[in-house]
Image (tube, rainbow, N blue to C red):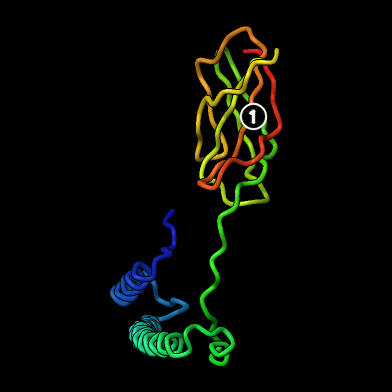
Amino acid sequence: MARFPLVEAEIAALAETIEVGLTDNPTIYPSPPAIPPHLVVLRTNYTSAKNTLVAAQAAAEQATSDKDDVLDDLIKAMKSDLRYAENTVDFDDDKLKLLGWAGKKTPTALQIPGQTRLLEAPRQGEGWVFLDWKAPTEGGKPAAYKVMRRERDGGSWEDIGTAVITEMTLVEQPRGKELEYNVIAINKTGDGEPSNTVMMVL
């Protein structure tokens, strides 16, 4: 059984085929509910409406392009005035506020990162461990993270890797020893406080 088309062009083509078929075969189809002349009128109305829509869409696209061009001109003029105002009042914030603008923000010195949070080791295997953690909520923005390790019996902490994201997989780890790990956020200002410690035997 045939399916009625969903695409407009296919609907219009089928309508024309029905018109011709009904017109050429009146003995087979003597009394169709929608006679061929009526189908012709409806198809003509559809074509006219479609052409009107296409023209309207083209006009809308042109109107949008015209609007964007005018907006671009406005933005350029506004930026020119704002640069003029900044230089004229030497970035005086109170005077620039008269124009709805503001002066330069005073740069703030980069701070040492805060403490790395919620270190955990959700996956591990023979000689490897996957660590993940959360960035500090206080202090300066971290540039990277140092992953530290020591033996649980009191060995000194050693730097065993650096990550720029908040996770790292460590391979070729010592086997059969109780190991502790922590993570420290760092930036060019210095090192933050070490995270909590996780302990495991690989």
Nearer-the-camera pick, 182 or 45 = 182
Residue with the most extreme top position: 176
Residue 168, image quadrant: top right
Question: Quick check: 101 left or right of 62?
Answer: right
Residue with the most extreme bottom position: 98
Residue matched to label 1: 182
Query: SS for tag 1?
Result: strand
Q: Position of residue 13 (x, y in %)?
A: 32, 70
Q: Residue at horizontal 60%, vertical 48%?
A: 112
Q: With respect to residue 169, does 31 lie above or below?
A: below
Residue 28, image quadrant: bottom left
Q: Residue at horizontal 52%, vertical 41%?
A: 144
Q: Is residue 68 visible?
A: yes
Q: Residue at horizontal 67%, vertical 17%?
A: 200
**Amino acid at circle 1:** Asn
Residue 70, image quadrant: bottom left
Nearer-the-camera pick, 148 or 6 = 148
Residues packed near mark 1 inside 10 Å, few (<14), some (14 to 19) or many (20 plus) = many
Q: Position of residue 192 (x, y in %)?
A: 63, 41
Q: Is residue 37 visible?
A: no
Q: With respect to residue 177, does 60 lie above or below?
A: below
Locate the C terminus by quadrant.
top right
Nearer-the-camera pick, 173 or 106 = 106
Q: With respect to residue 76, does 112 lie above or below?
A: above
Q: Position of residue 93 (x, y in %)?
A: 56, 83
Question: Quick check: 165 left or right of 49?
Answer: right
Question: Quick check: 102 left or right of 6?
Answer: right
Q: How many marks?
A: 1
Q: Residue at horizontal 47%, vertical 78%?
A: 33
Q: Position of residue 67 (x, y in %)?
A: 39, 87
